[in-house]
Image (spheres, rainbow, N blue to C red):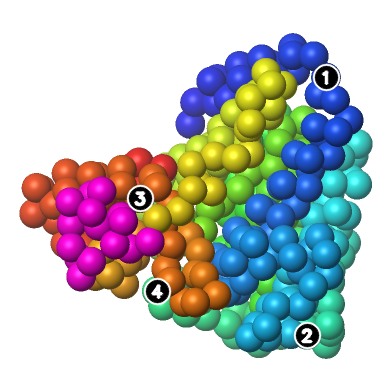
């Protein structure tokens, strides 16, 4: 993959005047909520972005949500804060102990017996065809992974972060919490290298998981790498806009449409929008207290992309794969 544009963008950011302390705190707070919301949502947590902020910033319990979902939000923030505290270290110094500590924080109070422990049982990824390593091999695979990570000093930081995430989630060393731990490890490596953290958005969940599975089944890893690069690029843009005095974190993703408004603007029926949502072509951004499904405004562009792919007489699964290119 070509990382030159992202390297140049980071140099552009490094050359800008330092951000004011207040702005740094605002961005840090925004990323804490957004990373926590997105990473947990990928794993099925139903807290909305707003509810996640209430839990992690104000300690407010959300009615109708489980204790586990609350703990997943609180724990992810604690793990992210610990990851951020490691930024002065070198990625080549990251150890298995560090990975186990992240995992301990992720599962604290949820599954203490398995927190920070490699699995001793076979596991499967729900809905995926990937066969995961035998539990007897996990310890040796993690030893090899740590050795590889310590010797990977010449890789581009984004390549290293993406590959570390991919390798860890493919070993799947834990009973639960593998995805969250892998994404935090990826972001720890990015932060150690002076890059902002990468957010895999909730609306990109299916293309992200499909790209991972494709690579794990022996296919090309390009789709997966593009997703990570796009995530890093978005975060760099947020910081550059902030440095230039723009309202960086308030993006189109914070402006939502109800299904009727989305259908009207896209020239589709409500039934079609529901159908495409059910099959993963469209992503719900939020669910209101009244139960309304809200969509990001950029789903309008997604619908245009779906139409373009439909002209090729593709199946729904093939359209899903095609949408990876548009992230």
- Comparing labels 4 and 3, the label whose residue is closer to the camera: 3
| Near-viewer residue (283 or 109) | 283
Q: Are marks 4 and 3 in contact (CB under 8 Å)?
A: no
Residue 286 location, x and y as percent?
Answer: 51, 64
The kind of secondary structure the magenta stretch mainly shows is: helix
Q: Sort mark 1 into few (<14), some (14-19) or many (20+) by Cα contacts within 10 Å.
A: few
**What whole-number distance in Å separates the C-alpha atoms at marks 3 and 2?**
36 Å
SS type, badge 2: loop
Q: Residue 59's image quarter?
A: bottom right
Numbered-mark total: 4
Q: Is residue 223 magenta?
A: no
> Range of the magenta residues?
258-272
Residue at 58% over, 82% down = 123
* CA distance for labels 2 and 4: 26 Å
Q: Position of residue 135 (x, y in %)?
A: 66, 80
Residue drawn at x 88%, y 30% as measured from the top left? 21
Identify the mark nearer the N-term, 2 or 4.
Answer: 2
Cα distance, mark 1 to mark 4?
Answer: 47 Å
Q: Is residue 159 above or below residue 131?
A: above
Q: Nearer the viewer, mark 1 or mark 4?
A: 1
Q: Is residue 257 visible?
A: yes
Residue hosting label 4: 129
User: Element at badge 3?
Assistant: helix
Residue at horizontal 23 percent and vertical 44 percent from the top: 304
- Compared with 13, 86 (above or below) is below
Q: Is residue 261 magenta?
A: yes
Mark 2 sits on what residue?
Answer: 111
Read off the residue under disc 3: 299
Of mark 3 and mark 1, the one earlier in the sequence is 1
Left or right: 107 as drawn, with respect to 242: right
- Other-residue count near label 4 (Cα within 10 Å), few / some / many at <14 / 14–19 / ≥20: few
Left or right: residue 236 versus residue 292 is: right
């Amino acid at each position: 993959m070509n990382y030159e544009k992202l390297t140049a963008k980071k140099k552009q950011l490094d050359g800008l005047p330092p951000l004011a302390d207040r702005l740094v705190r605002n961005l840090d707070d925004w990323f804490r909520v957004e990373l926590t919301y997105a990473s947990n949502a990928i794993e099925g947590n139903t807290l909305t972005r707003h509810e996640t902020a209430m839990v992690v910033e104000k300690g407010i319990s959300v009615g109708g949500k489980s204790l586990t979902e609350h703990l997943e939000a609180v724990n992810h923030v604690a793990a992210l804060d610990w990851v951020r505290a490691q930024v002065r270290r070198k990625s080549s110094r990251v150890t298995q102990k560090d990975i186990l500590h992240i995992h301990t924080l992720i599962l604290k109070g949820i599954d203490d017996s398995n927190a920070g422990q490699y699995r001793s049982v076979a596991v499967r990824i729900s809905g995926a065809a990937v066969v995961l390593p035998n539990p007897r091999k996990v310890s040796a695979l993690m030893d090899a992974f740590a050795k590889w990570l310590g010797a990977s000093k010449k890789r581009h930081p984004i390549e290293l972060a993406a590959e570390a995430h991919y390798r860890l989630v493919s070993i799947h060393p834990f009973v639960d919490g593998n995805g969250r731990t892998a994404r935090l490890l990826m972001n720890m490596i990015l932060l150690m290298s002076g890059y902002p953290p990468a957010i895999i958005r909730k609306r990109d969940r299916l293309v992200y998981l499909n790209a991972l599975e494709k690579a794990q089944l022996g296919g090309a890893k390009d789709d997966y790498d593009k997703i990570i690069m796009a995530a890093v690029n978005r975060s760099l843009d947020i910081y550059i806009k902030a440095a230039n005095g723009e309202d960086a974190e308030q993006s189109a993703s914070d402006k939502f449409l109800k299904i009727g408004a989305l259908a009207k603007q896209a020239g589709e029926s409500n039934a079609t929008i529901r159908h495409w949502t059910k099959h993963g072509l469209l992503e719900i951004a939020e669910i209101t207290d009244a139960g309304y499904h809200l969509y990001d405004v950029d789903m309008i562009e997604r619908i245009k992309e779906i139409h373009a792919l439909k002209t090729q007489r593709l199946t729904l699964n093939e359209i899903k794969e095609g949408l990876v290119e548009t992230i």
